[in-house]
Structures are given as C-alpha cells and as structure tokens.
Image: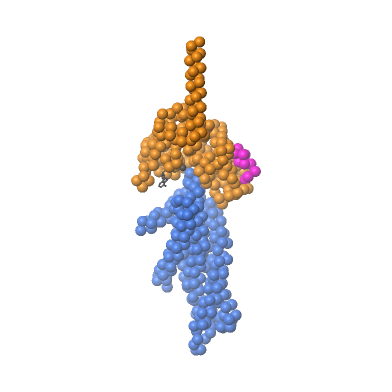
Chain colours: A orange, B blue
Amino acid sequence: MIEIHNIHKTFNGNKVLDGIDGVFESGKMNMLLGASGTGKSVLLKCIVGLVKPDIGSITYDGRIFTNNKLDIKQEIRRKIGMLFQGSALFDSMNVYENVEFPLRMLTDMNRAERAERVEFCLKRVGLENAGKKMPSELSGGMKKRVGIARAIAPHCTYLFCDEPNSGLDPLTAIKIDELIKEITMEYDITTIVVTHDMNSVLEYGDNVMFLYKGKKLWEGHSSTIMDTNVRELNDFIFSNRLMRDAKKIEQIEEEEQRQEDEQNAKK
Amino acid sequence: MKTFGAFLLFLSSLVKRGESPRILFKRTIDEAILIGIDSIFIVGVVSTFIGAVTCVQISYNLTNALIPRSTIGFMVREMTILELAPTITSIVLAGKVGSNIAGGLGTMRITEQVDALEVMGINASSYLVSPKILASLLVFPMLVILAMFLSILGGYLAGSLSGALSGQEYITGLRSDFIPYNITFALIKSVVFAFLISSISSYQGYFTSGGALEVGKASTNAVTNSVIAILIADFVCAQILL
Ligand SMILES: Nc1ncnc2c1ncn2[C@@H]1O[C@H](COP(=O)(O)OP(=O)(O)O)[C@@H](O)[C@H]1O
Ligand SMILES: [Mg+2]
C-alpha cells in the first residue's frame, strides 16, 4: 500500500500539483485518470522519486520515502518496477539483456539464476522467443511487454505504469491492460496506472482518482464513475461519443427498468 | 556563470554514490573500445594528410639555399608533436566523439532511459557518464600518439613523392635536437582535451529536455563548446607548461 499526503509541485511558477492525497491499495489496479497536461506523469514521478515534491509526504507500506536516508530510499526503490510511456528500453541492449539488467545491478543472483528468472518473465509476458531481438526491431506492443518483464523481473512489490496503452491499437491495448491486471492480482502488487483512456478504467480499473489541473476532483471505484456529478469529470468522460451513447443506453435501460418496476408494482 | 556552476555540480555528482569498481571497469573498457574503433579511421586519415600538407608547405616556403633541406623534417616533427597532432586530433574527436556522447545521452534522456535507471536506484549520471570520461582519458592519448606517428609518416611520403627532400634528409631532420618533454607536453594536452570534450558533451547530452530537435541541438552545442574549450585550454597549457 502506498499513501501520499498533500503533494505540491510547482515548475517555474507553474503550479502542476496542488495538494494531492491518496491511498493506493495492493493487489488493485489504482488508476490516475485525467486529460493530457494535468500533471499525472508528474505525480507518478513524485511517487517514485524522480521528481522531488515541494511539499508532501509519501509512504510505502508505512515507510516514509520522501526525505528519508538514501539507503532506505534505495531499499524501497529496489522493489519498484516502472513501465514508461515510451517503454524506455535500453536501446544498446537486446531484450534478454534489458530484462536481465535490473537483476545484474540490484541482486546477487548468479548467471544461471538470472537466466531462469529472465526466461520466466519473458514467458509471463508472452515473449519467450524474442530474447535476441533488439528494441528497435520490436513493435510498440512488444516493447511494452518487455518493459513489463523488466519491471517485474526483480520481484517488484510496486508497479507504476505511465499510459501503458497509449499509442497502441485497441486490441493490443486491451491485452497490455489485461496483462498488468493479471500480474497485479497474481503477485499482490500495488499497481498505479496513469491513463486517459476510459476503456481501461471501466474494464480493468479498481480504484480511480480523477485529476484536473493539478487537483484531485473525484475518487472512487471504477464501477461508480459513470454516476458522478463532478462536472469536469463528466465533461471528460462524455467528450467521447461512444461514452455518450453508452450513457444514453444506460439511461434508457434504467428508464425501462423503472417502468417495468412500476408496472410490477401496480400488479 | 550559472551554467558553469551547474557543470561543476554535474561533475561532482559523478563521483558521489558511484557503481562498484567492477562495473565501472567493465563499462569503461566497453566505451574505450567503442571510442577507439569509431575514431581510428578518421584520426588516421586526418593526421596523415596534415603531416603531408605541413611538409609540402614548409618546403614551398623554404627557398633559402643556405638552410639544409633536412630542416623540413625537423619542422614537421616539431609542429605535429607540439600542436597539430594533439590539437587537431582533439578537434576532430570533438566532432566525432563529442557529438556521439551528447547525442547518445540526449536520446537516453528524452526516451526516459535515464529515468529508468534512476527508478532502479542506479546513479544514472555516474553509471552512464563516468565510463565515457574515463574511456576518453584512456583512449585520446593513444590516438594522439598514433596521430603523431602518422603525421610524420605523411610528411615523409609527401616529401619523397614530391621530391622536396630525400627520405634520408627527412630522417636526419627528424632526429635533430629532439626534446622528449615535447611528447609529454602533447600527452598532457591530450588528457586535458579528453576531459574537456567528454565532460562538456556529457553535460550537454545529459541535460537535454524536449524531443529529437533538442538532441540535435545538444550535439551541436557539445561540439562548438568543446572546440572553444580546447582552443582556450591549448593556449593556457602552452603558457603554463612551456
Ligand atoms: N520537468 C519539468 N519542468 C517544467 N515543467 C514540467 C516538467 N514536467 C512537467 N511539466 C509541466 O507539468 C505539466 C503536467 O505535465 P504531465 O504531468 O506530463 O502531464 P500529463 O498529465 O499529460 O502526464 C505540463 O504543463 C508540463 O509542461
Ligand atoms: Mg504523461
């Protein structure tokens, strides 16, 4: 479980995060939803420690992360896996070496143990035969899979994904979301996913936090998000025609249900 | 001035919280091989021709019959060892190695590979940059020695092919009044230039932000700033060490 409290961040007078609180549970898909430029990536970077918040505290399973001693920070960092928006694979290394890299740097596994773990992780993401390929030879979806394999290789407890399905075709996007969800539940990982994709939220989200201009305007379970009366969130959800149609259908169905109930009641 | 402060901070971040010596050693050797193989051809071509051109031009200017032709050999040796081999080679390497370092680091930065290292708890600046600087310190003097050798050979070939002086005369000139300190001086310069090029280019690349366009700009800045730094350092070295 990760807890954040009162996170503020300003870049050159531009307030990007304005006092954000939240709790991210383990074994759940915790989603950060919001339009582009609302500070989702910055918040994620604050949580993993790539950006230092101006004010605020972050705790990992009760252990303070911000402003703590370097070795404690490093110890927590070793349990963090991150999937970057552009995958961020090391382009001078092949797929196998990419996944092996954190094991080589962060663990004292020997070569055979590392090989076993890399094989396992590549198999888990469905890329058992791609070890020799270079990142430049991979499709976008495959890169994300390698990114996931690299993130989970050192047995991470916390997984961060920045727009894991952006830039992918809808089918591949669903598969990547599915994979992240499976891994989260399988290993009881605390997963935080940044997204602007309502499909992912409705299909795979558990807890959702809606960010708007650096503020948290809504949070709750993904199943209740369609019923929100926060105007900004409504605008965000229903900027998409499909979503408007879905809502209309839902309302029509509700109306029918109500009429049916009324009739049943009359009888 | 602010940039210079940031540059010093960057350099100090390289030594703090470094990786284990074993990894540093391995990465340095890898980088050294890359830099060496990458630059050996261009350094060879440039220095051979510089030697040849120097020889031809000196012989063109040396019309006085009282001065022995072997002086040409002497002058080619002095000019290439003292100035041309270390400085021109370093300027060529600023273009080749400097742009490569800045472009590589810049790309890693904008594609978040640097962040990926940091998230793993690795000190990205020391992991990526220190080996490049160490490798440059190791390889540049070797390339400069090669350049001295090839320039003198180029002068020999040009001299005998153009008939300006015989091979024997050239060698006599090469052997006269040799000061071993000049070689030391050239090697010291090459180490200084190596440090300037690799650290300036790393700094430019490491702090790239934006996109592909900025990576291109970082490469260009790396080369121009390195060249200016080389020329200033060349002057300072000559003042202090000669
Ligand atoms: N390192 C930085 N320096 C200055 N401004 C930044 C930096 N990182 C992000 N920003 C600004 O913060 C805002 C939010 O960015 P970001 O978190 O990337 O948005 P998104 O929600 O699309 O991920 C943007 O206006 C961006 O310009
Ligand atoms: Mg983003």
Residue visible at 50% across and 63% down in the picture: B95
Q: Main secondary structure of the magenta part?
A: loop
Left or right: B169 in relation to B193? right
Residue visible at 45% across and 63% down in the picture: B224
For the question of whether residue B74 can be seen, the reply is no
For the question of whether residue A234 can be seen, the reply is yes
Magenta stretch in the rendered image: A122-131
Image-quadrant location for residue A50 = top left
Instruction: Determine the residue located farthest toward the left in the rendered image.
Output: A13
Residue visible at 35% across and 58% down in the picture: B1
> In the rendering, at what x and y percent does residue A225 appear?
46, 29
Up-down relation of residue B101 to residue A258 (above or below): below
Left or right: B239 in relation to A167? left
Nearer the observer, B232 or B135: B232
Left or right: A103 in relation to A49? right
> In the rendering, at what x and y percent does residue A70 appear?
43, 43
Residue visible at 45% across and 60% down in the picture: B221
Instruction: Determine the residue located farthest toward the right in the rendered image.
Output: A129
User: Any magenta on residue A123?
Assistant: yes
Up-down relation of residue A249 to residue B193 (above or below): above
Q: Which quarter of the figure is the C terminus of chain B placed in?
A: bottom left
Image-quadrant location for residue A7 = top left
> In the rendering, at what x and y percent does residue A58 appear?
41, 37
Instruction: Count how many numbered circles sit on residues in the image.
Output: 0
User: Any magenta on residue B101?
Assistant: no
Instruction: Determine the residue located farthest toward the top in the rendered image.
Output: A267
> In the rendering, at what x and y percent does residue B144 appear?
52, 68
